[in-house]
Image (tube, helix red, strand yellow):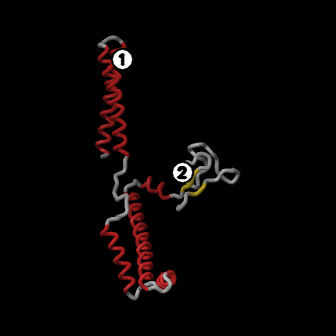
Amino acid sequence: MKTVGAVLRIIGIIWFIFAILQLIADMLGVVEGVQGLLGLLGLALAFGAFKLGTWLQHRKASTAPEFVDTSPEADEHLWGRALAEFESESRRPGLWARALSESNGNDSLAKARYLRRRHEELRAVQEEDEKKIRQAAYLASLTEEERAYALIPKGTCPGCDAVIPLDSAQCPGCNALFGADSAWSIKPLEGA
């Protein structure tokens, strides 16, 4: 796609030059007024081709799914794991005791509570694992420089809410200054 993007950018530039020449010829009276309109249309198309080429050149290909598998089969697998754990010696005694306590000693109700909680925990672990896989795929799609920038801790500027590296001395968005003598400080992003 980067090659296609580069070709579209070159076509856009050539088209732009041609359209400018048509407009100049129309202004000098060398060609009729219709040619001037075609020149304006050419400018718009040239700009569009250039922008599309730029987008194609710089976009990142999606290398991982953006969702968690919520198919019935995936969900059944988690329920099955919870049940297998319950019926084995690896049943968690603390969770079982809590479920039994909340069910006033009713074994059937306690089993249902245990299975529901374990299913929720297993789902959370699965979502976290899939998030890590998406993160790794995203980082693999970046250049070395982009990857280095993506991995540094970031925060938000209190002046303009721009996301910037935590060690920034100045915000590029609003020029707020940060440091020992400044009243401003970068607020770390949550989860970072």
Note whether 60 is above or below 10 in the view shown: below
Note whether 116 is above or below 19 in the view shown: below
Q: What residue appears at the point 32 percent right and 14 percent down from the top-left corner?
A: 33
Measured Cα–Cα span from mark 1 to mark 2 = 45 Å
- The secondary element bearing badge 1 is classed as helix
Residue hosting label 1: 24
N-terminal label among 1 and 2: 1
Q: Amino acid at mark 1?
A: Ile
Note whether 20 is above or below 3 in the view shown: above
Residue hosting label 2: 163
Q: What residue appears at the point 31 percent right and 12 percent down from the top-left corner?
A: 30
Q: Amino acid at mark 2?
A: Val
Q: What residue appears at the point 58 percent right and 51 percent down from the top-left corner?
A: 168
- The secondary element bearing badge 2 is classed as strand
State the residue in front, 190 or 140: 190
Label 1: how many Cα within 10 Å (few below 14, some 14–19, many 20+): some
Q: What residue appears at the point 33 percent right and 15 percent down from the top-left corner?
A: 26
- Quarter occupied by residue 12: top left
Q: Give the image location of residue 160, x and y in percent.
A: 59, 45
Query: In this image, 102 relative to 169: left or right?
Result: left
